Amino acid sequence: MVRCLVIEDEVDTSRYICNGLREAGYAPSAAFTGDAGLAQALGGRWELIIVDRMLPGAIDGLALIARLRELGHTTPIIVVSALSSTEERVRGLQGGADDYLPKPFAMAELLARIEAVWRRSGVGRHALQLQVADLTLDVSTMRVTRGDKAITLQLREFRLLEFLMRHESQVVTRTMLLEGVWDYQFDPQTNVIDVQISRLRTKVDRDFAQPLIHTVRGIGYRLAALAPAEADHAAASSAPA
């Protein structure tokens, strides 16, 4: 998933941003103070950080950005702030932010600015467009195609497919899928994964000669374009004993 860290002390604003990002196909996490935000920023791998200019705690938004840049972090950062004067915006950009969005703002504008930041950094389309064989997924538009056929997915199916594509050719366990796609932990023996994989297979593989979603019996799944011999072996391995 495209992981975004939202550092915002206003609970309603944080919820607004996180919900909007989630609906657009991103995977947001929230921090509510500068200290907690810095710790999370340093402790994880993020594709984007959105930070409020004014934060409670020992470190504000600009100091947080300065610290990350000092340590060599190049993650795109967008400042959101009620301080909207030209001087404050210049300060934020000169302090290491990639963009500065005054509050209040519309979610559509924030999403557009995210796209613009990625385009300028040369990362956007690489990070947001995934392809395995003739299967293509565009995170920014939530468009999925295989060959010349458009595939319509529900949000959870889309997130599941994105997770599998970002781990192309790797075996992903049920626990990894529960934590990476459902964002919480529960019994890995539950059949929710199998049900969703079955639905996804129907849409992604059913009308094509080459299957891409493979079961690894007793472990999980992997998405890969396998050679015929590998595909036969995978099919045998996933068959009931």
Image: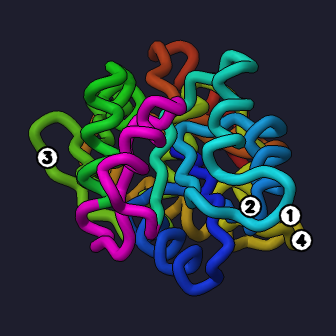
Question: Which residue is rendered at x = 73% and y = 71% of the image?
Answer: 191
Q: Is residue 205 visible?
A: no
Residue type, numbered disc 2: Leu
Residue type, numbered disc 3: Lys
Between the residue at mark 3 and the residue at mark 1, the CA separation in whole angstroms equals 33 Å
Q: Earlier in the sequence, mark 2 or mark 4?
A: 2
Callout 1–callout 4 Cβ contact below 8 Å = yes
* Residue 192 position within the rendered picture, expressed as x and y whole percent measured from the top left: 68, 72
Q: Which residue is mark 3?
A: 149
> Is residue 164 placed above or below 73 in the rendered structure?
below
Residue type, numbered disc 1: Pro
- Labelled disc at residue 187: 4
Q: Which residue is mark 2?
A: 178
Question: Which residue is rendered at x = 53% and y = 24% of the image?
Answer: 231
Question: Which residue is rendered at x = 68% and y = 72% of the image?
Answer: 9
Please tell me whether residue 204 belongs to the stretch shown in magenta. no
Between the residue at mark 2 and the residue at mark 4, the CA separation in whole angstroms equals 9 Å
User: Closer to the camera, 160 or 112?
Assistant: 112
Question: Which residue is rendered at x = 60% and y = 32% of the image?
Answer: 167
